[in-house]
Image: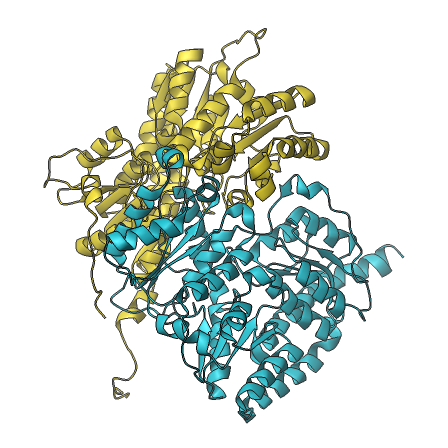
Amino acid sequence: MADKDKKQDDFRNVNENPCNMCMPMGGILALKGIEQSMVIVHGSQGCSTYMRRHIAEHFNEPVDVGSSSLNEKGTIYGGEKNLRLALDNISKVYNPEIIGIVTTCLAETIGEDIERITGQYLIDREKEEFPIVTVATPGYGGSHFEGYFLTVKRLLMQLTTVTKKNNKINIIIPNISPADIRELKGILEVMDIPYVLCPDFSETLDRPFTRPYTKMSAGGTKLADIREMGGGLATIQMGVTLEDEINPGKYLEDSYGVPLYNIPIPMGVEHTDLFINTLANITGKAVPDSLQRERGRLLDGMIDSHKYNFAGRCAIFGEPEMVYGIAKICLENGVFPAVIATGSQGEKLKQLLVRALADAVDKSQLLIETDFAHILAACQEEKINIAIGPSDGRYLTEKGNIPLVRLGFPIHDRVGGQRLLSVGYRGTMMLLDRITNTLLENKYKNYRSSMYEEFYKNA
Amino acid sequence: MAEKSVGIIAERDGFIATKGKNKKQLQCDTDSSAGCVSQRACVYCGARVVLNPITDAIHLVHGPIGCASYTWDIRGSLSSGAELYRNSFSTDLKEQDVIFGGAKKLTAAIDGLMEKYQAKLIFVYSTCIVGVIGDDLESICKAASQKHNIEVIPVESSGFIGNKSAGYRAAAESLLRLIKPDEDVVITKTNSINYLGDFNLAGEAWIIHNYLRQMGIDINVTFTGDSHYEALKLAPKAKLNIIQCAGSMLYLAGKMEELYQIPYLQISFLGIEDTAASLRKIAVAMGDDHALCKAEALIQKETARVETIIKSYREKLKGKKAAIYVGGGFKAISLIKQFREIGIDVVMIGTQTGRQEEYETITNLVDDGTVILDDANPAELERFMMEKGAHLLVGGVKERPLAYKLGMAFIDHNHDRKHPLSGFEGAVNFAEEVYTTICSPVWKSLSTGGIGKGVEARG
């Protein structure tokens, strides 16, 4: 048993420094990956603004998201009027090809029936063919992680139709960086595999500078492609920590018989091998030499830095899928993950980690639905010397003097979160180098004084 | 690619004016229209930004996790003492709590926090769903207050009860409860002032304290930058209130005048002109000739010091055009003057929560043709900045990427900035920041060179 089975009952009454965000946040991120889409947050004005601010600061991109701006009247008498007005106004200014509506605590608590409202709206506006995707994402229902995958599932449920079989592979991805998405697409392209990747925010949330500026960005998964995902050759989904109710790939399998290959994010040698071998197995395509060389280069780099890495005792935190990917890289390289944490629900993650840690040299603390106060305490008990996760982990640096390798979402206090590459062989190498160099930097910073203290001054 | 359509939203007409063109009064201080992509946050946000700088308080958000997550330590308020305010505590309400009520959880949360932190003051913020599920914050806080023998003050900040201004009001009500003397206490007035509406971003309140100290004027307490429980309790002792951020503090000042006979004075420490005028006004209002002499000496010395620096920037910036979109009216007004000091004209100006009288002042200050807008959205900002040929935008985090995507310079005037913009020091920082962004070499790369257009001969 890898888990030290920590009792953590006090956080159930109070969360001290959150390690997760709320459901609609994940919904917005997923919807930003659909071509020519706009999002409306059905709730009071603040929700959309806070999430826009968070997303804008991470990606350094304008993030326009509408709100139904519910006020007291709307809360008492229902928000239909507000939501209809929001649909009208968003359509006028942005002229989107699809609108996603995510709800909030407020809308769900007052019992808004958004499917009925939007259905009636489209009839009244004589736009019955216009796609509106609705997702129930109350903030109290889960974290941004669950909101993201539920939204992807709802996209498929409401847009995918029965189509004849095609030769494309559906790739369903978690909240990885635009650079990561581009890397995955590069692998698919170098292997000459037709695909539909959903949601694809590699361009929409990392736009090149061009003139003139357009309110709607180019890129994103095409609606026509989503419609045809039901006829896909297979689905490869990076969602091993997903429960069934938020599992988009399982939906495609159950409803359309598309075989599902649910695999971890290709981070680390084994998981990247798995991704590429799965692609090769499904399509019968050969693995090109360029990928073999990338793999060889990663192995070579892992040998180069293995002794430095073995000195690492790390804390990993963030969204379950990403946490599992990072843990794998650490385990493959001797950086021992002594604290592994997520603010999200993580039963599946826990089971996977228990298995992955079965032969580990030491025991790890696994913290599920946790907060940063608990992560910090665990870090101090476990003598952690490196942390890996989103920038809120700067708290661990400030309070616990633990250096942080920034990865995941959000990253607010450094630039370039959208450009961090950590998937595939190349991404694994880049992340591993960042981890190794952080360990080295600390070693060089401290070894003179610590040797002096230990062997000279205190001798 | 040109955009397919840029619709104009009819409801927004009254909130946009061009000086010299229309004589109509600008509409402001109303709820945002649904779907207009307002840049405003919510009631809770307004309350939290005002109260959060109180350093030794526990700021406990009663609600689902998002509200606490999006506001954790994102503000740059500095403390000379306690650091408790930099934590974000939440009752992290879940589905069951929404059904069965969150009262028990809140009580348990307060008990747990008191055991760990022994604070003298707790603010309990209400969020959207608390307003709907009907937890009786008032009685829960009262009971907790008696149990722990400390102040537990509810903040009525449910998101749907209004806009950000309603949050300022909610914060003011909570502050009034806090500073209300116990019945047996007699207030002895001292010859000191309270400084309202400075949140000590990057040490701004400290800069102003230093000026006033040099003038021989005692500061009683600042609302709320670097303030703490004991000092705030003594707020009624002051002889005068000076107000910087009027949007958040005018109501509180009015109430303090009524309850404690403290007159108030609106001042601004943004820019040389306003800083100098404000120091004089304060000395006059205190009826202190000695302080006035010292103020003159200080103004002369500081102006001489910074004038040459600012002059050098003015020469580089002359003729550039600025657009302003900030939170409150006072800031906007000062910025117009501050831009004049460095030779820049304002061609577009707007605020999220400006008041009627502030818009009148703005209208009087700006040149004919300047566009004035209340509660603007990204589409309007884009349209008018382009139409008016603005070279730079002043705004917050959400506006920054828009400016950059338009290839436009940008000034951060938000709560998480890391450099002070107040006083003479701030005036220099401001001019320097304008220079840094307008005169950066990166803009050249946007309009020269390119690929795929052939090769120029190189000598």
Position of B372 with respect to B375 (left or right) is left
Position of B131 with respect to A365 (left or right) is left
Residue A351 placement (x, y as % from top left): 72, 63
- Looking at the image, is A341 positioned above or below residue B428? below
- Looking at the image, is B283 positioned above or below residue A308? above
> Which residue is painted at 67% across and 46% down in the image?
A373
- Looking at the image, is A424 positioned above or below residue B206? below
Task: Look at the image and tell me in which quarter the N terminus of chain B lies.
Answer: bottom left
> Would you identify the image quadrant in which residue B43 lies?
top left
How many numbered badges does the structure rendering display?
0
Residue A279 placement (x, y as % from top left): 55, 84
Task: Look at the image and tell me in which quarter the C terminus of chain B lies.
Answer: bottom left
**Chosen colour scheme:** by chain
Residue A266 placement (x, y as % from top left): 59, 75
Chain identifier of the yellow chain? B
Residue B312 shows in this picture = no
> Which residue is painted at 43% across and 37% down in the image?
B159
Position of B421 with respect to B179 (left or right) is left
Closer to us: B4 or B352: B4
Check the image and name the residue furthest to the right. Answer: A459
Closer to us: A413 or A165: A165
Chain identifier of the cyan chain? A
Residue A382 placement (x, y as % from top left): 78, 56
Residue B287 shows in this picture = yes
